[in-house]
Amino acid sequence: MKKILVLHTGGTIAMSEDETGAVAPGAENPLNQFKNPFDREYELLIENIFNIPSPHMDPKNMLRLRQRIMEAYEQENIDGVVITHGTDTLEETAYFLDLTVPLELPIVLTGAMRSANEIGSDGLYNFKTAILTAASAEAKGMGVLVVMNDEIHTARYVTKTHTTNVATFRTPTFGPIGLILRDKVQFFEKLLRHTSLAIDHVVDHVYLFKAYAGMDPELLEMAVNEKTNGVVIEALGAGNLPPRVLPAIEKLLAHDIPVVLVSRSFNGFAQDVYAYPGGGVQLKKMGVTFCHGLNGQKARIKLLVGLSAGLDKVALDEFMADAVS
Ligand SMILES: NC(=O)C[C@H](N)C(=O)O
């Protein structure tokens, strides 16, 4: 019998709606009444490690999840892990674990868009399919996965795309790597490579900025100080910025603060294509690191992990630019 560690962290999957329609966590996680949605086909080790909405999640809590998984792997002989999580920041926790857990062990995150007592609640169903996936032999060595609404996505590329729809989790550019077909877990793709860094602490002051037409330089200028550990910018299109923010970027780089560029576009990769002022060619020459195919919040998690692992400039650049991990 497969032994699955279940870590409930909170989110809508652990909430209920009141008579006014407001959704909030109660004293007890409603999923706790389902000790096992499979009638004992699997052994579930259930722990309510947190009970927080996911906007309250932070890298320190993510590190606690990592540590609990490592401990359970070493001491409790588990075959897989399911983490239930609020959907707002689920992709960040999933990617953090993907980058820091050096195991072939299936780790699956899931959540819900409708709380436990709403009509059409998706929580219990997603919980069940996440367990099925974590227990499947094919999930081994696939990195951290996100299972929602009958789709299996990689932690690296999945993102929340809709505020309320149950089909909110999407993988732009590539699509899901598997499906749940009436209780059957079916993968269509394999992982090319899985890179992970062992970390025992997390650095703070890694900032995320978004570029826009006429972007003001003042906020970026404020990041030029000794507290700042790193900066990620969601740039325009293929990886370009308004020229008026370049002096602030020069100052950040002169202070040895890494500046990482992704695109604010939903699909595609940031690249050094354009040679006009503020274009990717100039940014690359200045020493900005291009990060391929990640959105801003994921690139920020990756930078935070690389910095927390103590990578030097060259290694950090390589790590951030790696397009598949
Ligand atoms: N559907 C959800 O879980 C959203 C909720 N606000 C959360 O992330 O905790």
Image (cartoon, grey):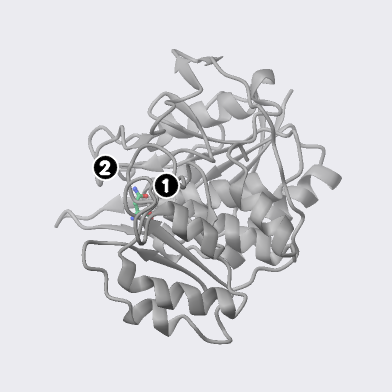
Vertical relation: 109 (above or below) 257? above
| SS at badge 1 | helix
Q: Going 24% across and 43% down the picture, which residue do you hit?
A: 164
Give the quarter of the image for residue 114. top left
| SS at badge 2 | loop
Residue 325, labelled with which disc?
A: none
> Of 4 and 312, which appears nearest the observer?
312
Residue 162, labelled with which disc?
A: 2
Q: Split into 4 quadrants, where in the image is the N terminus?
A: top right
Q: Would residue 16 appear left or right of 178 to someone viewing this image?
A: left
Vertical relation: 141 (above or below) 208? above
Give the residue pinned by disc 1: 30
Q: Going 76% across and 44% down the picture, which residue do you hit?
A: 102
Can you see residue 47?
A: no
Q: Which of marks 1 and 2 is in front?
A: 2
What's the CA distance linking mark 1 and mark 2? 24 Å
Q: Split into 4 quadrants, where in the image is the C terminus?
A: top right
Task: Give the residue type at disc 1.
Answer: Pro
Give the quarter of the image for residue 104. top right
Closer to the chain start, of discs 1 and 2, is 1
Q: Would residue 325 appear left or right of 214 to someone viewing this image?
A: right
> Of 188 and 231, which appears nearest the observer?
231
Q: Position of residue 238 (x, y in %)?
A: 37, 45
Q: Going by the picture, which residue comes out furthest to the left?
A: 20
